[in-house]
Image (cartoon, rainbow, N blue to C red):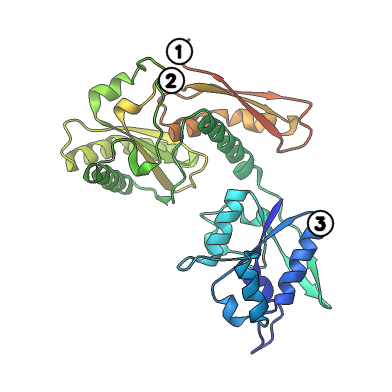
């Protein structure tokens, strides 16, 4: 497993007043991680090269790409967290990254704390991941990855915005206006799928064809579902009126396991690109420890996948326990042809 080393944090450990960050600290951290079988990835902010004690040697490490410097204009903490998320990696740092807890909800289970004593580094342990925030998201993420391998691109995670009816309407108006102004002929922001037709005309959503050129999927946390549904009609009217559309757009509220409570995301799609049926159904084989929990949340998994794919009807999600899945958190995903039989 990779470990993103917050090199600036490590180098500054134990630095006395007016003292310089230590390159030796970084070397010792990398050696300790390698001895445990980890693959350290050294990441430093742009200022470290000007502050560190061994400038010439450190610059050589940068030139040889042994140490990666955060791109100019990028916040180092966010860069490290994002890389760890994309690589499903750990992070070696004593920074708690508290200001990023809303965006990256698994920081505590990724972060490895450390101390130096008598010139030696002692590595701590990460907190155990919270089951609710991890197993369901990991399953949904793997399902969407499998769909992408089949040629179906999914809506990518955007930064959550605070949930309110007017906020959703404003965001929808901005995105639809942008798509019109820039002449984007598929789904907005280049993040939507192009549906393979497999040689036949797909059956479109009848209501969508009669109602509007756009379908607005409002992606929200399951906690906020009822409140968002109550606003759906007003959102549709507001968007249609402001954009002077012939018909109000169809607004579909969907539970989404990637969206934090109190916020929302939007997947806005042209109605003629909507698939009525999900192209594949999802089979989840899971360990007995997590079976009941995942089974209970199978509809939220189905809703998440459908909303991210831009599919009107949910895929069928079946969950089965297996004795071969011995540890909590273990699961396997297979897809089988869905849609109309």
Q: Quick one: 260 or 6, which is closer to the camera?
A: 6
SS class of the residue under badge 3? loop
Q: Quick one: 164 or 48, which is closer to the camera?
A: 48
Dots 1, 2 in contact, CB < 8 A: yes
In the drawing, what numbered circle is on residue 29? Answer: none
N-term-proximal mark, 1 vs 2: 2
* 338 shown above or below 184: above
The residue identified by callout 1 is 340
N-term-proximal mark, 3 vs 1: 3
The residue identified by callout 3 is 36
SS class of the residue under badge 2? loop
SS class of the residue under badge 1? loop
Q: Nearer the viewer, mark 3 or mark 2?
A: 3
N-term-proximal mark, 3 vs 2: 3
In the drawing, what numbered circle is on residue 277? Answer: 2
- Residue 272 position, x and y percent, is 30, 26
- Residue 126 position, x and y percent, is 72, 56
- Residue 138 position, x and y percent, is 61, 39
């Amino acid at each position: 497993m990779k470990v993103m080393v917050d090199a600036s944090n490590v180098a500054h450990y134990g630095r006395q007043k007016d003292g310089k960050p230590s390159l030796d600290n970084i070397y010792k951290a990398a050696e300790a991680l390698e001895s445990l079988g980890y693959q350290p990835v050294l990441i430093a902010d742009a200022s470290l090269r000007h502050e560190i004690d061994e400038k010439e040697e450190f610059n050589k490490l940068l030139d040889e790409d042994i140490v990666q410097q955060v791109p100019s204009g990028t916040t180092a903490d966010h860069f490290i967290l994002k890389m760890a998320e994309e690589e499903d990696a750990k992070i070696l740092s004593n920074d708690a990254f508290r200001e990023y807890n809303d965006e990256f909800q698994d920081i505590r289970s990724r972060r490895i704390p450390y101390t130096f004593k008598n010139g030696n580094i002692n590595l701590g342990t990460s907190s155990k991941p919270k089951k609710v925030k991890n197993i369901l998201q990991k399953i949904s993420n793997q399902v969407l990855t499998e769909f992408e391998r089949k040629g179906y691109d999914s809506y990518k995670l955007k930064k959550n915005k605070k949930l309110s009816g007017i906020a959703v309407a404003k965001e929808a108006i901005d995105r639809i206006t942008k798509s019109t102004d820039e002449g984007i002929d598929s789904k907005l922001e280049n993040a939507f799928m192009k549906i393979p037709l497999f040689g036949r005309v797909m059956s479109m959503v009848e209501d969508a064809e009669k109602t509007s050129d756009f379908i607005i999927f409002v992606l929200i946390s399951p906690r906020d579902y009822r409140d968002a549904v109550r606003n759906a009609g007003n959102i549709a009217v507001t968007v249609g009126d402001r954009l002077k559309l012939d018909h109000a757009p169809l607004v579909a509220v969907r539970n989404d396991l990637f969206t934090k409570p109190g916020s929302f995301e939007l997947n806005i799609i042209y109605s003629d690109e909507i698939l009525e049926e999900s192209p594949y159904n999802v089979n989840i084989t899971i360990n007995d420890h997590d079976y009941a929990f995942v089974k209970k949340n199978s509809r939220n998994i189905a809703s998440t996948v459908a909303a991210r794919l831009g599919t009107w009807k949910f895929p069928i999600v079946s969950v089965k326990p297996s004795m071969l899945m011995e540890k909590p958190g273990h699961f396997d995903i297979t897809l089988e042809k869905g849609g109309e039989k």
